[in-house]
Structure formats: structure tokens, C-alpha cells
Amino acid sequence: MKNQIAENVDRIMSIDFPRRGVIDTIYPLARERHGEPLAMHAAELLKSRVKQGDIVLIATGWLDRPHVSLNVAETDGPPGAAALARALHLGLGAIPVLLVEEELIVHMTVLMHAVGLRVLSVDEACAAGRSQAALHACAVVALPKDWHVAAALAQDMIDRYPIGAFVAIEKGGANEYGEIHTSRGANTTAALGKGDAVREVCAAAGVATVGIGDGGNEIGMGSIAEPLRGVLRHGDDCGCGCGGGTVPAGATDSLVAATVSNWGAYAVAACLAGLKGEPSLAHSPDREQRLLHACTQIGLIDGVTGLVEPTADGLSLETQLSFVTLLAAAVGTGVAVQGWEGERRASDMLTETADARIRNRNG
């Protein structure tokens, strides 16, 4: 059952609906690295390492038009972070701490409220986890744009709190020269919080790390950097003059490559729901609609179209809702599983018969 869920979830999250031509390159490389379905690999890692009351650091957000304004960010990333934070909180008892640029604190706060988690300070969120009265809390913290300050923030968090995992979702990764680029090769280093600095500190402390991305330039893609550089446009040469390409240098313990980064986060939540036997942990169409409409209210743009609308990466609201519905079906929501019992038993018998024939043929 777990293997079926894992394969189905990965199939769904890696369909190249926008015909971008990138996921068909990235996904096989990540799959080869892990040797198993990617979303389930990440979900199992998180389930094994995150304990009740642990903080999970989740870095997201991309100020991807800094040449115009530092107040422009996209709809891919923050919704996925919100949905996965909810699943980790309700499923594992984690305290999510969202790391975003100072400019995105208000935006991320609105999205966390849209999935039902109350934004408080880190200490208050931890206290809420110990409260006898129900209060589902998280925190949103500014991710410094200076590498050393970001590393100091991470070390302080590790010194003060139990950190179960670090997750990056559609967060720009630094190449070997410390430069961060969009998939188009534009240098956005100065504008972005340094998630890689947090990743490095967490990795050095033995904290589990997960990277989720869709373009090959996000934190975690350094796990497959060598083959990726030669096949991605701008992979070897970004064109900005830094001397490197768009592919990050740093690796994560688990890498999830999806058609849309939000989808990768939703896929991990779905696999966590499957592992826990709790379908309610999976993202839902209702929450997706709330999240994307909230994105329009706070001015996030679709990173492809540049429009303020309830879409992500050029894919319509209807497509996003359909994707979430299919993911939920992969873990049993809306599926009358009992009605297929006879067919499944017959299929299992055919498989066993075929296996027996192969064994006999091979002596």
C-alpha cells in the first residue's frame, strides 16, 4: 500500500502540464539519487526525525523582481510551505517556524492563518504546544539577507530549541560562488534571505534537511548538481558575470523535484498522511482555494504570468484544485477502496502466477 501511494503521488506531482521541459530532466536525476519515490522519501525522513514539540524550520518565498521592487514575490512556495507546515504540526506535533524575507512576513502570516495555524512568537508557539487548551500555533521569522547573520540565527535556534528538520520550498540556492539566480539566470542574491546558510548550520548539527524545487536553481538541487549543470539552460553559465551557473552547490538529505514547487510540498504532506493513516493531513481543494485567493489579497504574483491572480506557475486555479484532488485520492480520499477488493485479489493472483513462471523459467 505504501509503495502504491508513493508511486502514484510522484507520478501526479511530476506531470509536465506547462510543457516547460524541466521536470522530465530533474525528476529522473533526483529519483536515481534516492532510488525510490521522492515525496515518500522526504515524508519518511521527516516522520523519523521530527518528534512532538520539535521545531521545523521552513524556508520559502522568492523576491523575484528585485530590479523593480523588493515588495514583489510569487505564489509558488509560500502556499506549499503553509500546507506542509499544517501537516507536520497536526501529524507529528511539530512547531513550524517559517523563514521568509522581512518583506514577506505579513504575507506569510496571512497564509498561515488561511490553513488554520495562529502565528505567534517562537516562544509563544512552543508554549501553545504544551497548552492544555487547544491552540495550533506557528511562528514567522525574518530570514536575514546577510549570510553570516542568517547562520547566526540558525545557530541560536539550534542552541535554544529542539530542531527536528529544515525544509526549503522554492527557495533560491547559492551556487559555488555564493550567488543565487532565477531560472532565467537573473542574479537575485542581494534581495534574498540566505536559506543555504541555515541549511549548512542545520546539516552540521545533524538536523535532517529537505529541499523542494521545480527549476533546478532551488536549495537542495545541489544534490544532483553535477549532471544538472550540463543539461539546464544557464546551468553552467548564468550570464550575470559571477562565473558560475544557476545550479546550487549545496545538497540536502532529501530532494523533491516537482512540476511546481507547491505541488512537491503538497505531495510530501500527502505521503505523510498515507504513512500516518490520516487522510486529513493531506492538502485539500478547499484550503488550496483559500490559500490562492489569499495570495491575491496580499499581492503575490504568478511567477510566470506576472499577474496578481489565484494561480501558480502559469497554471489555473482549476488546475491547482484538480491536482490537489488527485493527491487526496492517492491517499484514499474520495475512493471507495472496498469496491476494488475482488479485482485487487485477482490482480495479486495474476502477479503471483507470473512470478512463479519466471522463477520456473530461470530454474
Image (tube, rainbow, N blue to C red):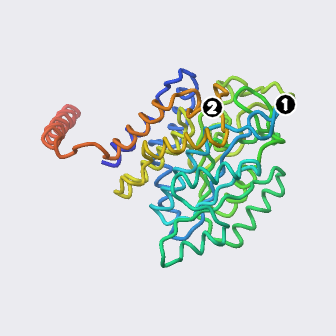
Q: Which residue is mark 2?
A: 302
Q: Is residue 116 left or right of residue 232?
A: left
- Residue in view at x 51 percent, y 61 percent: 89
First in sequence: mark 1 vs mark 2 = 1
Q: CA distance from mark 1 to mark 2?
A: 30 Å
Residue 56 rendering spot, x and y as whole percentages: 59, 60
Secondary structure, mark 2, is: loop
Query: Which residue appears farthest toward the right when viewing the image?
Result: 241
Neighbourhood count class around disc 1 (C-alpha, 10 Å): few under 14, some 14–19, many 20 upward:
few
Residue 349 rendering spot, x and y as whole percentages: 14, 39
Q: Which residue is mark 1?
A: 243
Q: Is residue 166 above or below residue 53?
A: above
Figure quadrant of residue 246: top right
- The quadrant of the rendering that contains the C terminus is top left
- Residue in view at x 49 percent, y 24 percent: 17
106 or 189, which lies in front?
Answer: 106
164 or 287, which lies in front?
Answer: 287
Query: What is the count of numbered marks?
Result: 2
Query: Which residue appears farthest toward the bottom when viewing the image?
Result: 132
Residue 67 rendering spot, x and y as whole percentages: 83, 32
Amino acid type, mark 2: Asp
- Residue in view at x 65 percent, y 31 percent: 303
Mark number displayed over residue 233:
none
203 or 314, which lies in front?
Answer: 314
Which mark's residue is nearer the viewer, 1 or 2? 2
Amino acid type, mark 1: Gly
